[in-house]
């Protein structure tokens, strides 16, 4: 199973800044290993975020995103104590969902 | 019309040259690190290391929570800034990584020799790096203060000094060739002067670190291994006396420097 994400969400005024660090190899499929064989592509394809269960972000990612990606976004109307959930699905079908409470 | 355009473009390029050159390469790199600091993937390794520290693993199915890093069994906070140090149970001076491997051997039943043979970035070595990241992170913001009260610790400092200044290999390099003076650099990387306290969060006080360019987490053992590769020396063994001695030399010299480990590097 994939390693957990690190999610920090901080409220300021009427919005909250959410910062997410994901643990993923993000292989492009373009590289070759030491034996000369291509390393199969393995990257996050879908990212979604929800605020108290309501979808607030949905993104389609590709192999151009770095290893161990960092994502930051702002949620309007989020306040301290709200729940932010982030999930991703990679091209192998592996998925991960983590939650954080806005502080 | 064309030549005029080229002239105009040239004039513009010359005109803006000095203004953009005011920011040095080092400032640029510092700015880049600042931007990345917010999402330092070292945190992922820190979390992994914390889980590994508490997880029951190995042939003996035990956690590392009873591991003595120098401040008593299970004390993690503050241990990093006092390592390497002398340990009575193993009767030698050990750095963070070799001490962790000792604990994995005595508490969990792993073979220390087997772990030392694993190449960096594979299998159990990845776990050692994650554990080192976790232990280092627990002392973030504290200042280096390596003990030098035991005779073996002073002995290792002297050995480390000699290793640091030892010239050899096809390029006749020593550590001091690059790290013995202020203001040296390799390409755009400023090199810390490791013969004295190079300042807060520089040199010994910055590793383990996440390297953005290759997406790898590096502990001090791998950092030294790669320094020797660049000098075209033979690779030192993992946790070998030479690497621990150089670490003692750097750590004692860095007395008072604030640790920012785990940091982020280009």
Image (spheres, grey):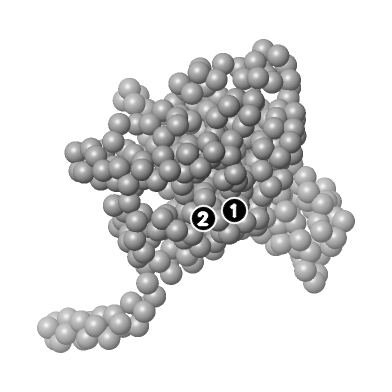
Query: Which residue does the numbered mark 1 point to in the structure image?
Result: B144
Q: Position of residue B128 (x, y in %)?
A: 57, 31
Q: Please, which chain is the residue tagged with disc 2 on? A: B
Q: Position of residue B134 (x, y in %)?
A: 65, 41
- Residue A98, quarter of picture: top right
Q: Residue at x 81, y 56 (%)?
A: A102
* For residue B199, above or below residue B224: below
Query: Which residue does the numbered mark 2 point to in the structure image?
Result: B254
> Which quarter shows the N terminus of chain B?
bottom left
Q: Is residue B234 left or right of residue B201?
A: left
- Looking at the image, can residue A50 be seen? yes
Q: Residue at x 65, y 57 (%)?
A: B141
Badge 1 element: loop
Q: Residue furthest top?
A: B59
* For residue B62, above or below residue B181: above
Contact check, label 2 and label 1, Cβ < 8 Å: yes
Distance CA(mark 2)–CA(mark 1): 6 Å
* For residue B146, above or below residue B53: below
* For residue A22, above or below residue A56: above
Q: Position of residue A57 (x, y in %)?
A: 69, 53
User: Does label 2 or label 1 sit earlier along the sequence?
Assistant: 1
Q: Position of residue B63 (x, y in %)?
A: 73, 25
Q: Residue at x 33, y 51 (%)?
A: B176
Q: Please, which chain is the residue tagged with disc 1 on? A: B
- Looking at the image, can residue B43 be seen? no
């Amino acid at each position: 199973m994939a390693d957990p994400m690190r999610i920090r969400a901080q409220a300021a005024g009427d919005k909250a800044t959410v910062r997410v660090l994901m643990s993923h190899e993000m292989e492009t499929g373009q590289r070759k290993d030491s034996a000369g064989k291509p390393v199969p592509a393995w990257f996050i394809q879908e990212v979604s975020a929800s605020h108290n269960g309501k979808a607030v972000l949905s993104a389609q990612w590709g192999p151009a995103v770095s290893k161990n990606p960092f994502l930051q976004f702002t949620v309007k109307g989020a306040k301290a104590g709200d729940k932010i959930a982030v999930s991703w699905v990679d091209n192998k079908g592996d998925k991960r969902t983590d939650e954080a409470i806005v502080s | 019309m064309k030549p005029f355009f080229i002239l105009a473009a040239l004039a513009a390029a010359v005109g803006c040259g000095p203004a953009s050159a005011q920011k040095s390469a080092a400032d640029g790199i510092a700015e880049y690190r600042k931007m990345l600091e917010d999402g330092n993937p070292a945190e992922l390794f820190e979390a992994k290391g914390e889980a590994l520290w508490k997880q029951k693993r190995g042939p003996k199915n035990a956690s590392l929570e009873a591991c003595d890093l120098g401040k008593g069994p299970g004390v993690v906070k503050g241990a990093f800034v006092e390592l390497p140090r002398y340990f009575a149970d193993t009767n030698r001076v050990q750095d963070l990584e070799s001490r962790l491997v000792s604990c994995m051997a005595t508490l969990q039943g792993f073979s220390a020799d087997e772990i030392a043979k694993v190449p960096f970035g594979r299998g159990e070595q990845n776990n050692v790096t994650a554990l080192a990241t976790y232990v280092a992170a627990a002392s973030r913001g504290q200042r280096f203060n390596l003990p030098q009260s035991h005779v073996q610790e002073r002995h290792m400092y002297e050995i480390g000094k000699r290793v640091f200044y030892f010239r050899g290999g096809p390029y006749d390099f020593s550590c001091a060739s690059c790290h013995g003076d202020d203001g040296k650099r390799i390409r755009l990387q400023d090199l810390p002067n490791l013969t004295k306290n190079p300042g807060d969060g520089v040199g010994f006080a910055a590793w383990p670190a996440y390297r953005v360019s290759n997406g790898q987490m590096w502990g001090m053992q791998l950092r030294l291994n790669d320094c020797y590769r660049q000098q075209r020396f033979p690779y030192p063994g993992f946790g070998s006396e030479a690497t621990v001695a150089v670490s003692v030399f750097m750590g004692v010299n860095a007395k008072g420097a604030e640790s920012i480990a785990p940091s982020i590097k280009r």
